[in-house]
């Protein structure tokens, strides 16, 4: 691990747990390059799209309370907002990336992860309702339910719906309904322009370059990305999730039931969670300017490995190595 971290100039943290035993917990590089503040295993890192699993759980908790259902139409909550979203789009389709709605950050488009893609100033995106102007005017890509197409806008819409039906700000809703029951004490939506001392700054590249991602991403995240967490909190998350402490175990089974094959990613997708192409492993992933993240949990083996980096591509060499090492596959390295 140390060799691969050195060769790839990895900046971030890694943790491996098997059952109740932590087999590895270590960190490399700097949380703040300018002030030479090192990353530690307690550092809070942005996890980008990793938050989608937490968004799905917050929505399901509202379904358990009778405030929504999988068949609920988004339009019933959106009212006149976002008129280009088809009236037939359901909560389930949004969760499964099968809604067909237009995406403000279309991952099928030909663009670099470090491009400046937001059409409005990032400081205006400081609460979920502020995203309405970002999502408005995007034409649908296909009819609801037709196929899988990964959609960031869909998870912002889920956050809007959850916030409106619960009457709780989305960031607080996730903390109350997901993070607290999961024991994720160091996980929160932080402002990128006033990060606390234990949070890592996101950098666009490896090495010594110090350009940060503060102008690339919303100043506060929402349902599609932007929460900060630690490797320890992510281990707590998986433990609590499969113990039924966040939502019922019946609902966990529904969330991780495959809804789509995604050959381009060599995976399947459930509701908010990536799934191994053939096995039982469940995953959350995040990739953004200054952020790369992947956590993998095999419930049968009680095995978890998490890699978080505060650079755009830093996590991938180490998480691939862990996949090979922990599945007893030949190690290409």
Image (tube, rainbow, N blue to C red):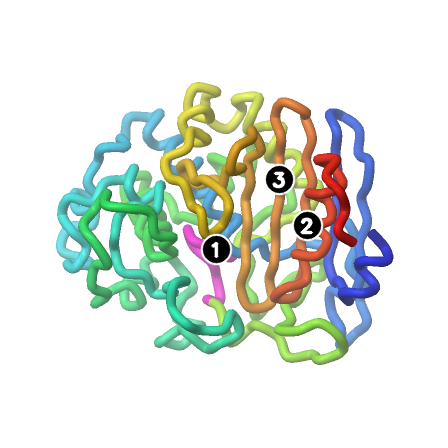
Q: Specify start and end residues of the magenta stretch as a single range.
A: 218-226
User: Which residue in the protein does label 1 denote?
Assistant: 225
SS at badge 3: strand
Find residue 149 and name its label: none
Q: Earlier in the sequence, mark 1 or mark 2?
A: 1
Q: Of tags 1 and 2, which is closer to the observer?
A: 2
Give percent across and percent down for residue 298. Answer: 62, 30
Residue under label 3: 296
Q: Nearer the viewer, residue 311 or 160?
A: 311
Label 1 Cα neighbours within 10 Å, binned few <14 / some 14-19 / many ≥20: many
Q: Is residue 84 magenta?
A: no
Asked if the stretch drawn in magenta spans residue 222, the answer is yes
Residue appearing at x 83%, y 63% in the figure: 6
In the picture, measured across the screen, residue 192 lies left or right of residue 303, that is left
Q: Position of residue 13 (x, y in %)?
A: 74, 53
Callout 2 crowding tier (Cα within 10 Å): few <14, some 14–19, many ≥20:
some
What predominant SS class does the magenta segment belong to?
loop
Crowding at mark 3 (Cα within 10 Å: few <14, some 14-19, many 20+): many
Q: Marks 1 and 2, how far apart in space?
A: 22 Å
Tell which circle, 3 or 1, labels the residue nearer the N-terminal end.
1
Looking at the image, residue 318 sits to the left or right of residue 142; the answer is right
**Residue 237 location, x and y as percent?**
60, 35
């Amino acid at each position: 691990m140390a060799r691969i971290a050195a060769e790839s100039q990895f900046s971030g943290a890694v943790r491996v747990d098997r059952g109740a035993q932590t087999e590895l917990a270590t960190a490399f590089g700097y949380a703040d390059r300018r002030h030479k503040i090192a990353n530690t295993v307690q550092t809070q890192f942005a996890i980008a799209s990793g938050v989608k699993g937490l968004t799905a759980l917050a929505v399901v908790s509202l379904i358990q309370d009778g405030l929504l259902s999988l068949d609920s139409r988004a339009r019933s909550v959106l009212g006149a907002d976002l008129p280009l979203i088809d009236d037939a789009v359901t909560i389930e389709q949004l969760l499964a990336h099968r809604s067909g709605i237009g995406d403000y950050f279309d991952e099928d488009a030909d663009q670099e992860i470090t491009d400046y893609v937001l059409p409005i100033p990032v400081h205006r995106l400081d609460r979920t309702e502020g995203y309405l102007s970002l999502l408005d005017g995007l034409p649908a890509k296909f009819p609801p339910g037709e196929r899988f197409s990964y959609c960031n806008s869909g998870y912002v819409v889920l956050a809007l719906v959850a916030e409106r039906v619960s009457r709780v700000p989305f960031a607080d809703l996730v903390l109350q309904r997901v993070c607290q029951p999961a024991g994720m004490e160091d996980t929160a939506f932080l402002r990128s322009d006033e990060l606390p001392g234990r949070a890592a700054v996101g950098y666009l590249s490896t090495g010594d370059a110090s350009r940060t991602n503060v102008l690339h991403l919303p100043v506060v995240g929402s349902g599609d990305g932007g929460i900060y967490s630690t490797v320890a909190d992510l281990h707590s998350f998986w433990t609590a999730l499969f113990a039924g402490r966040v939502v019922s175990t019946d609902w966990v089974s529904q969330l991780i039931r495959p809804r789509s094959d995604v050959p381009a990613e060599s995976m399947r997708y459930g509701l908010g969670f990536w799934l191994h192409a053939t096995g039982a492993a469940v995953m959350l992933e995040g990739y953004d300017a200054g952020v790369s993240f992947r956590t993998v949990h095999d419930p049968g083996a009680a095995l978890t490995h998490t890699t978080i980096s505060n650079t755009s591509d830093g996590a991938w060499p180490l998480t691939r190595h862990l996949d090979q090492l922990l599945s007893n596959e030949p190690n290409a390295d």
